[in-house]
Image: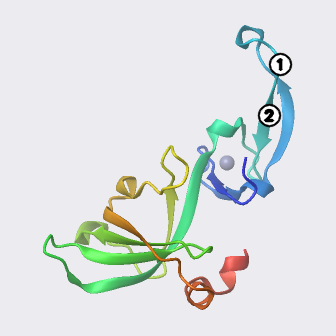
Amino acid sequence: MNMKSRYRCNNCKRVFFGEEFTSEKAPLLLHHGGGFVDVYTAPCGHKGAEGVWELVEEYKVAAISDNTNSFGLRNVVVINVDGRAWGLGSNSLNLPEVGEVLVVPLLLNGSSPNWATMGFEIPEEMLAAPDDVVEQVWGSSSNE
Ligand SMILES: [Zn+2]
């Protein structure tokens, strides 16, 4: 597990940092060849091997365009606490609110958010937001 990454519990859907988990060695079943596996316990009390936890990133909606593009989509700008920023196309049914926090699972490559599962279209990663913008969007909650 990556200490700085965020993981979502498949059981209770809460999101935790990797560093909030505790791990212990548990014996593997013999038909898997024996040995030991790392089992992680989240602050919520749920347990599981690393693959049980869904790797996610949290983004806050920083801005939404007033106008729509030729496909009827509004442009939604989202920023995470590290300044990573994306521009997303959103139809009116799926439109989030400014200030809303979106928890998005990562694709299997582990680096790109799977915006399609959230109903967003044409995602484009933007230049990283400067610190003062991150501070403005996330405020003191960036230290939680
Ligand atoms: Zn849980």
Q: Which residue is mark 1?
A: 35
Element under label 1? loop
Label 1 crowding class (10 Å Cα cut-off): few <14, some 14-19, many 20+? few
The residue nearer to you, when weighing 71 against 46, is 71
Q: Disc 1 residue type?
A: Gly
Element under label 2? strand
Q: Disc 2 residue type?
A: Asp
Question: Residue 66 in the image: x percent, y percent?
Answer: 26, 87
- Above or below, 63 relative to 116: below
Q: Quadrant of the C terminus?
A: bottom right
Question: Residue 135 in the image: x percent, y percent?
Answer: 62, 87
Relative horizontal placement of residue 24, taking residue 96 as reference (left or right): right
Residue found at the very far top of the displayed protein:
31
Cα distance, mark 1 to mark 2? 11 Å
| Residue shown at 72% from the left, 43% from the top | 46
| Residue shown at 57% from the left, 55% from the top | 56
The residue nearer to you, when weighing 57 against 42, is 57
Q: Which residue is mark 2?
A: 38
The residue nearer to you, when weighing 89 against 44, is 89
